[in-house]
Amino acid sequence: MTLTAPGSVQADSAAGGPVPPNPARGLVCRNCGTTFELIAEHACAQCFGPLEVDYDRELLRAVTREQIEAGPQNIWRYSALLPVGQEPAERVTLDPGLTPLVRADRLADELGMTAGLWVKDDSANPTHSFKDRVVSLAATAARGLGYRKIACASTGNLANSVAAHAARVGIPSFVFIPADLEPGKVVQSAIYGQTLVAVDGSYDDVNRLTSELAETDEFEDTAFVNQNVRPYYAEGSKTMGYEIAEQLGWRIPAQVVIPMASGSLLTKVDKAWRELAAAGIVEDTPWTVYGAQSAGCDPIATAFEQGWDVVKPVKPFGIAKSLNIGNPADGPYALDAIRRTGGAVGRVGDEEIVQGIRDLARTTGIFAETAGGVTTAVLRRLVADGRLDPTKETVVLSTGEGLKTLSPLEPVVGPTHRVEPSLRSVRAAGLIG
Ligand SMILES: *Cc1c(COP(=O)(O)O)cnc(C)c1O
Ligand SMILES: [Zn+2]
């Protein structure tokens, strides 16, 4: 099964006239360069290297600002830069994207940052994390490839998004999660009435299990969004980069702080900006990419510090569960982007993560899940250590919603006063004289 070939004109588009071409011409191995058709594989048949979407560069370079701006108010405005074709037969999507880019002046002041600081608030997506971007791409590609069921191994947010996408279009989904996930993420996965399997093990165990399941006859007709259709899934993260540039008035920010689990999101924000610059949609100004991890799961941070090209797997722990991937598939590529742009990786412990969530909420009104606490706390660290330039424009990503991860906050925040329903009691509490 393959998706539509580049440049092929299948039928008339909804608007009449020929369907615009799919800019993706195949998959290419990042390791050995072997090319493949647009198939449902994530590993090279020659060398087992990771496969990535290979675009027709001329088609990408022909994309214009005007074309994007005329599109819908969601990620599909960038469809001429995405690998499923501009008018796929059926989109499997919650139409995520165009989430707020919030100016964070008070946080900047606290950190001694003198140029603009913005928070990209991806909690504003339909299932309240950035994962709706990648699932919309993966599920739509899966449909185009003939699959009628979707599945995933997840650290939580992916589970929420896969189950919701399946519910929206009425297809079955099979979601596998570590059994010790936060209750908010378990409920938000279960509520859509799909198959939800809690596995007694870590995310890396769950991931191994789903790779084995994908080889069974029972799951032959199932697309695992972050496994066999991973090349398409990963491209969805580019929309985060496109949006930041567009929302800044078609500019690339000088610095960006990105949370890392597998490392994929980080590589794709960087890729998005390279594409926009190559197409002349933005000026090709330099940018620096910073990665953020927790101390409980820091394999990419360690590789960065040690100067390694490979990433040594770890056994994760700690509250930043959405980022707890101990064996990050895109770690080496994230390291490449960070080193090429002169960036760094910051790591922060659980107390700093909680403080990061509180700082972000107190200064911006954005309530982030633990991943947003990681990026906010890493931003503070990088500024304090002199590794991030406080005189340059900076964007920090907040990739998920705080209501999903309440438990680390319950012991540290709550009502500031407790009173009886009487003025006397309010007075006694010191709120009035
Ligand atoms: C999945 C996820 C990420 C990053 O994922 P990558 O695997 O590095 O692409 C970041 N933040 C949140 C909240 C996530 O759920
Ligand atoms: Zn290869």
Image (cartoon, rainbow, N blue to C red):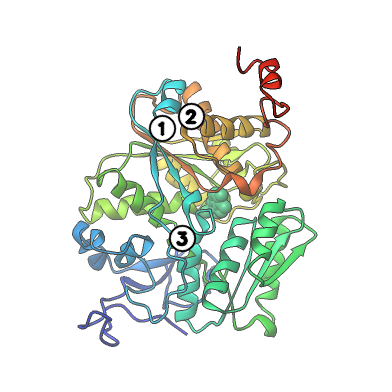
Q: Position of residue 292 (x, y in %)?
A: 54, 39
The residue where tag 1 is placed is: 104
Q: Is residue 88 above or below residue 426?
A: below
Q: Please, what is the three-letter code of the amino acid marked with disc 2?
A: Thr
Looking at the rendered structure, the secondary structure element under dot 3 is helix
Report whether 19 appears left or right of 312.
Answer: left
Neighbourhood count class around disc 3 (C-alpha, 10 Å): few under 14, some 14–19, many 20 upward: many
Of the two numbered discs 1 and 3 on the same chain, state the one appearing first in sequence.
Answer: 1
Q: In the image, which is nearer the foreground, mark 2 or mark 3?
A: 2
Residue visible at 34% across and 74% down? Answer: 85
Q: How many marks?
A: 3
The residues tagged by marks 1 and 2 sit, at their Cα atoms, a distance apart of 7 Å
Nearer the viewer's eye, disc 1 or disc 3? Answer: 1
What x and y, as percent, mark residue 60? 26, 64
Q: Residue furthest bottom?
A: 11
- Seen in the picture, residue 155 relative to 80 is either above or below; the reply is above
Tell me what residue is drawn at x 71 percent, y 27 percent: 418
In the rendered structure, are the residues bearing label 1 and label 2 in contact, judged by CB atoms less than 8 Å apart?
A: yes
The CA span between labels 1 and 3 is 24 Å
The residue under label 3 is: 133
As shown in the figure, which amino acid type bears the numbered disc 1? Ala
How far is the residue under mark 2 from the one under mark 3? 27 Å
Q: Is residue 33 above or below residue 430?
A: below
Judged from the image, the secondary structure of the residue bearing numbered disc 2 is: helix
The quadrant where residue 5 appears: bottom left
Q: Residue at x 51, y 64 (%)?
A: 50
First along the sequence among labels 2 and 3: 3
Quarter of the rendering occupied by the C terminus: top right
According to the picture, the residue beneath numbered tag 2 turns out to be: 363
**Which x, y percent locates residue 169?**
52, 77
